[in-house]
Amino acid sequence: MTARFTGRTVLVTGAGSGIGRGIALAFAREGARVAVAGRTAEPLKETVALIEAAGGEAVALTADITRSQDVRRLVQDTVARFGGLDVAVNNVGVLTTPAPVADLSEDDWRSGLDTNLTGTWLSMKHEITHMRAHGGGAIVNVASNLGAHSRRPNLGAYAAAKAAVSVLTRNAALDHIADGVRINAVSPGPVDTPMSTRPGESAADKAGRMGREVPAGRAGSVDEIAAAVLYLASPEAAFTVGADLVLDGGITA
C-alpha cells in the first residue's frame, strides 16, 4: 500500500472484471477508498474481496449507467458511504456484434450507444454535479484506440461511440475546468482481457496475433492501463486537461 490517494474516494464503473477491476485495485493499493460499480453484484463483491484482502477499503454498488436515476443514486451512495467523491473513472463499455454498417441491427446500434456513450455522459453529468459543488475533482473516461484514433472493418458502431467519448471528454474538460473538475481520457488498444480475445482463440494464438498486429509485439496489461489512469487522476497531472492518452503499443503511432 502506498499513499498517493490516501484519504480520497474513488468511484470506478465497470469494476467487476478486466480493466475496471485492475483500476479499482490500483487505486486501493495507493490508499483510496473505492466504490466499485456495475450491473451485477457477484463480480463486484469479488473485486471488493480482493481489495480488502490487500488491506484496502471498498464497497460494491450495483447500477445501470444507462439510467440517470441509477447513476444519481450511485454517486449519492458513494458519498454517503465514504463522505465524498474525489475521483471517478468511467470504464463501462460493450462491444456489440461486429457487422458492416449497412448490416448493423438497430438494437445493437442503440445498445452500443446507450452503454458506451450515453452511459459515459450520464456518469459525468452526475459526478460533475457533485464535484463542482464540493471543491472539484478528477474524472478519467475509458475510450478506445478504435474511434478517434483508428478504425477497423465491422466495428463502426463501437468506433463511433468511442470516438464520441473522446470528443465528449475534451468538451467536458473545457466546460468544467473552471469548476475545479479536471477531465481526461485514456484510449487503450488490445489489452490482455477476454474482450480482446477472438471466439475460439487460444492463448498461444492470441499471443501470436498480437505479435503480428501490435508494433510493441504484445497486448497491453491491465496494470499498464491502470497506471495511466492513476497518473491522470493524480496531483502530478494537475495541468493535464482534456487529454486523450492512447495506450496501444504503437498501433496508431
Image: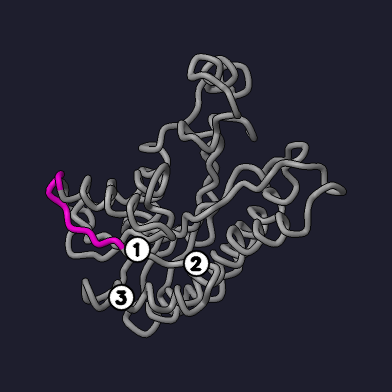
Q: Residue 252: where, in percent of width, then height?
A: 64, 35
From the image, tell me which residue sits under label 2: 65
Residue at 18% in and 64% down: 7
**Disc sitting over residue 224 in the figure:** none
Report, in whole angstroms, how far the alpha carbon at label 3 lies from the one at label 1.
10 Å
From the image, tell me which residue sits under label 3: 77
Task: Give the image quarter of residue 37.
Answer: bottom left
The amino acid type of the residue labelled 3 equals Asp
**Label 2 with label 1: CB-CB less than 8 Å:** no
Kindly report which numbered mark, 3 or 1, lies closer to the viewer in this rendering.
3
From the image, tell me which residue sits under label 1: 11
Q: Identify which residue, 115 or 87, lies in the foreground.
A: 115
Residue at 71% in and 54% down: 108
Q: Earlier in the sequence, mark 3 or mark 2?
A: 2
Q: Quadrant of the N terminus?
A: top left
Query: Helix, strand or loop at disc 3?
Result: helix
Query: Helix, strand or loop at disc 1?
Result: strand
Q: Residue 238: where, in percent of width, then height?
A: 38, 61
